[in-house]
Image (tube, rainbow, N blue to C red):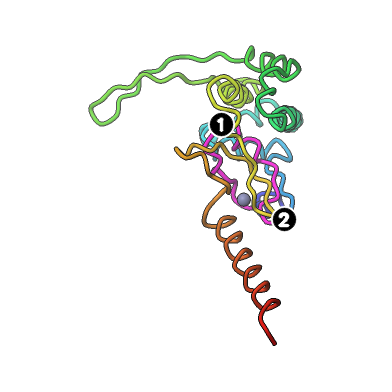
């Protein structure tokens, strides 16, 4: 069976693209899932995340070979884990010279170009990364990580409190009280667990 048929759909619930990237390795239901285990899987994820246009991954694989794509997926996993361990340290991630140096190496691969896009009678100016060489595919991820470090409050970068969950997110709520990757899944699970715990306590303390 190819990995495409066994991987669950990728998750984009982190409220920041750099943290969605971290969530390409996670244990959403207590079972570890690696979404970028090889080049083909990495390209599928980049397309799903909107970092790569549909079909570009296949084109790049054809031109450069699957070995180059697999190497790139390995580079992406290395960068991802470097970012993860830096963020575990909170705001001091900004002082992580090894991370900054790695991000600068990837950012240097970039060659963005501006483009006018006509849409519904309006014209918008957008900036796009080229996706010609495989190494350029990591530029949007390095840029997202660089933006997280420079533009966001790292005190609001959190790991879901769900007991079997390991997903990261940026708390963008006004009150700063987001605790779960998703209120529907982990939030509900936590509510049910708390309800059961209360019920158990009541059953224990109730007179016989
Ligand atoms: Zn969760």
The local crowd at label 2, few if under 14, some if 14 to 19, many if 20 or more residues have their Cα within 10 Å, is few
Where does residue 121 sit, x and y in percent of width and height? 23, 27
Q: Residue at x 65, y 25 (%)?
A: 91
Where does residue 29 sit, x and y in percent of width and height? 68, 56
Residue 10 is one of the magenta-drawn residues: yes
Viewer-closest of 187 and 197: 197
If the image is split into quadrants, where does the N terminus sit? Answer: bottom right
Disc 1: which residue: 56
Q: Which residue is drawn at 63% across and 73% down?
A: 199
Asked whether residue 129 appears in the rendered view, the answer is yes
Report if the CB atoms under discs 2 and 1 are less than 8 Å apart. Answer: no
If the image is split into quadrants, where does the C terminus sit? Answer: bottom right
Disc 2: which residue: 30
Decide: is 112 above or below 5.
above
Q: How far apart are marks 2 and 1 (CA)?
A: 33 Å
Decide: is 100 above or below 184.
above
**Quadrant of res 114:** top left
Decide: is 68 above or below 173.
above
Where does residue 155 sit, x and y in percent of width and height? 60, 31
Ligand 1 under 8 Å from disc 1 Cβ: no
Tally of numbered tags = 2
List the single residue furthest toward the left: 121
Q: Residue at x 66, y 36 (%)?
A: 22
Asked whether residue 65 appears in the rendered view, the answer is no
Question: What secondary structure do most residues of the magenta stretch adopt?
Answer: loop
- In this rendering, the label closer to the viewer, 2 or 1: 2
| For residue 107, side relative to residue 114 (left or right) | right
Residue 81 is one of the magenta-drawn residues: no
Viewer-closest of 186 and 16: 186
| Region of the chain picked out in magenta, as a range | 8-30
Q: Which residue is drawn at 63% across and 64% down?
A: 193
């Amino acid at each position: 069976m190819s990995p495409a048929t066994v991987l669950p759909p990728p998750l984009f619930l982190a409220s920041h693209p750099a943290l969605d990237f971290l969530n390409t390795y996670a244990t959403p239901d207590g079972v570890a899932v690696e979404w970028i285990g090889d080049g083909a899987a990495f390209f599928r994820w980049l397309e799903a995340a909107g970092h790569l246009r549909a079909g570009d991954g296949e084109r790049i694989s054809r031109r450069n070979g699957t070995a180059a794509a697999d190497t790139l997926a390995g580079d992406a996993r290395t960068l991802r884990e470097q970012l993860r361990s830096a963020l575990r340290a909170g705001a001091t991630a900004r002082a992580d010279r090894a991370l900054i140096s790695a991000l600068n190496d990837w950012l240097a691969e970039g060659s963005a170009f501006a483009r006018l896009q006509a849409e519904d009678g309006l014209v918008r100016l957008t900036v796009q990364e080229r996706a010609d060489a495989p190494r350029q595919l990591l530029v949007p991820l390095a840029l997202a990580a660089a933006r997280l470090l420079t533009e966001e409050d790292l005190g609001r970068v959190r790991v879901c409190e769900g007991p079997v969950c390991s997903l990261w997110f940026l708390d963008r709520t006004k009150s700063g009280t987001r605790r779960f990757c998703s209120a529907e899944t982990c939030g509900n699970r936590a509510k049910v667990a708390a309800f059961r715990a209360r019920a158990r306590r009541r059953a224990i303390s109730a007179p016989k």
